[in-house]
Amino acid sequence: MAKNTLYDKVWDAHIVTRLPTGQYQLFIGLHLVHEVTTPQACDMLRERGLRVAYPERTVGTMDHIIPTDSRERPYADAQAEAMMAALERNTREFGIPLLDYGSGRQGIVHVIGPELGLVHPGMTVACGDSHTATHGAFGTLAFGIGTSQVRDVLATQCLSIAPLKVRRIEVGGTLGTGVTAKDVILHIIHELGVQGGIGYAYEYAGAVFETMSMEGRMTVCNMSIEGGARAGYVNPDQTTFDYLAGREYAPKGDAWERALRHWQSVASGADAEYDDVVELSGGDIEPRVTWGVNPGQSVAVGEPLPDPALLPAGERETAELAYAHMKLEPGQRMTDLAIDVAFIGSCTNSRISDLRAAAEIAKGRRVAPGVKALVVPGSQQVLKQAREEGLDRIFTDADFEWRDAGCSMCLGMNPDKLVGDQICASTSNRNFIGRQGSPTGRTLLMSPAMAAAAAVEGRVIDVRGLD
Amino acid sequence: MTETRIRTIDGRALAIRGDDIDTDRIIPARFLKEITFENMGKYVFHDVRFDESGGRKPHPFNEAANEGACLLFVNANFGCGSSREHAPQALYRWGIRAIVGVSFGEIFAGNSEMLGMPTATASAETIAALQDAAETAPATEWTLSLESMTVSGGGLELPVHLAENRRKALLEGYWDSTATLVTNAALVEQVAARLPYMHGYD
Ligand code: SF4
């Protein structure tokens, strides 16, 4: 059993009681809600005559279904309109603050929570979305939950949950040029497998994470679930504190000093014990691209695609399915592949540093003929900052479409979708069959710079070789 | 307190083969736009069951012999991917009441439990035997017993596993977690009062 890790400290501080089932009742410090999981959860509350226990620890926004081209209400899609209306009605009725379009703070839940300073080290966070682990970048325990658990948290500010084991993933050394946080997490998932993290919280540690920006840490923690881990975190340090200083909901003045002392105390101790430790070397990581139908199926960009016969038995069948769906062949290289769409966005890679990295590639170039390229900032605040830096102009001058904040083409719930078997260079987190809205669509996950490079070249390319 | 104790699940079974069947395959995201779960049963496995013009494709959930089945035999990492409760809801509303597989996506398993739908695990050999039996003799009546932790039918009786806390929750009728959690409101307040961020770190 792990001891004196951040996980242990935060978990212990939030235990309400042990339930008759043996699970724990865990207090949740911050509950983020959005339009997709709340309608059913709020209906369940009404059916039972329950109220929201801690509305002030709950924050709502809209992200999954909103169109990113026109915000005109009612939305063209009647179902999207109904869902939005339900969110507005429910947050009003239950007294939950709603960061809607008019607030200027709307965005993807996992982008706005951190940027508003709502997420503090040592907290527990829950949200009805599996990428909630993003908030672990701040040294929190952050859990993605289902609708009935959203109901639990609304009604009681608690989860019924079994403890996790802790695996420390230590990535030492330094990253090469052109290698990003996205490549690090794709590498980790490739090494440990999409099921490797089941039952674990991942602690990301080592020199690579110590020197990584908060936004990079968020990208890594975001995809913990793609490696099977329910939660992932980085211990809070000066980088964390610097990021939080001055944010809207961050403590100020004396409270800041007291908060700092508390935050420092929640980091894993030097004597911490782990259930498992994995060591990887940052120098081995190259820019990566997925070629298959789960995020574990990735290669270093120049590498030939694997021969299913040489894969471990458990991976063979999925690899064959992936080859059939992706219309690819073993031995082929991803750099041979022409793309139809490039999508830069999602809670994995839609923050200002992601847009800057993409803009650096886009600057002075043009999207290749026949390619549709979208840039979708993760929040209205990211959008605003990008505008102030002139990034929007760089993109539009290069023929990228510049959109409003939302989940967009990360999942097929809004008008941004792949058509037929289009191939999409995407900075999102899931390449599951059908994920981007077309049952035959093909998703290649990669970093923002790699996606922007693919957009301008019209094919997958090693961003380090772009002249 | 909900008093729905679940001891056995009895009925016919069907098999879905393949590892890593993710929640997008169980229920494609475009169906998540409905604000109730009511219709989810119709959409289960939609894109592998129906072609683009709505015609039925060969799929276990389309076969007449499997209609009314309530046990589902699956392989490894079933339900990986998103936290959408729509996935277990879709299976449940189609008629599934228990799933036996090599392993499950964690959030999926938790979501299933909240519906009172156990996700029991078994060795790859056991699953292969169950899937073969269910496919060759779909009329077989099966029993998943949470008391003996076995699945039996068609002359087979094989061991299955379920985390003790999940098994207990189902057997003792505590799987409706809201009802349980609400009873501890006073303790919740004590914990909240102890947490520095709950009162401005003073
Ligand atoms: S961007 Fe994608 S993964 Fe992130 S919250 Fe939205 S839909 Fe989920």
Image: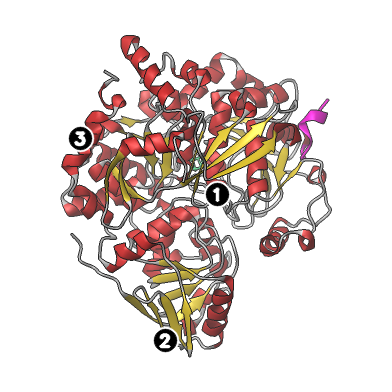
Q: Dot 3 lies on which element?
A: helix
Q: Give the range drawn in magenta.
A: A458-467
Pointer 1 and pointer 2 on the same chain: no
Residue beneath label 3, please? B190
Q: Quadrant of the C terminus of chain A?
A: top right
Farthest-out residue, front: A271
Q: Where is residue B136 in the image (x, y as percent from the top left)?
A: 56, 87
Res. B176 mark: none
Q: In this view, does B56 lie to the left or right of A148?
A: right
Residue B19: which quarter of the image? bottom right
Pointer 3 and pointer 1 on the same chain: no
Residue B102 vertical position relative to residue A437 in the rendered view, above or below: below
Q: Which amino acid does label 3 sit on?
A: Gln
Q: Is residue B181 magenta-colored?
A: no
In front: A434, or A146? Answer: A146
Q: Is residue A462 magenta-colored?
A: yes
Question: Given the image, what chain letter belongs to the residue carrying mark 3?
Answer: B
Residue beneath label 2, please? B141
Q: How is the image coloured?
A: secondary structure
Q: How far is the residue under mark 2 from the one under mark 3?
A: 50 Å
Q: Which amino acid does label 1 sit on?
A: Gly
Q: Where is residue B67 in the image (x, y as percent from the top left)?
A: 43, 80
Q: Dot 2 lies on which element?
A: loop
Q: Earlier in the sequence, mark 2 or mark 3?
A: 2
Q: Is the magenta stretch mostly helix, strand or loop?
A: loop
Name the residue rendered at 81%, 42% in the picture. A335
Q: In this view, does B154 lie to the left or right of B202?
A: right
Res. A197 mark: 1
Q: Position of residue A374 (x, y in %)?
A: 61, 34
Q: Dot 1 lies on which element?
A: loop
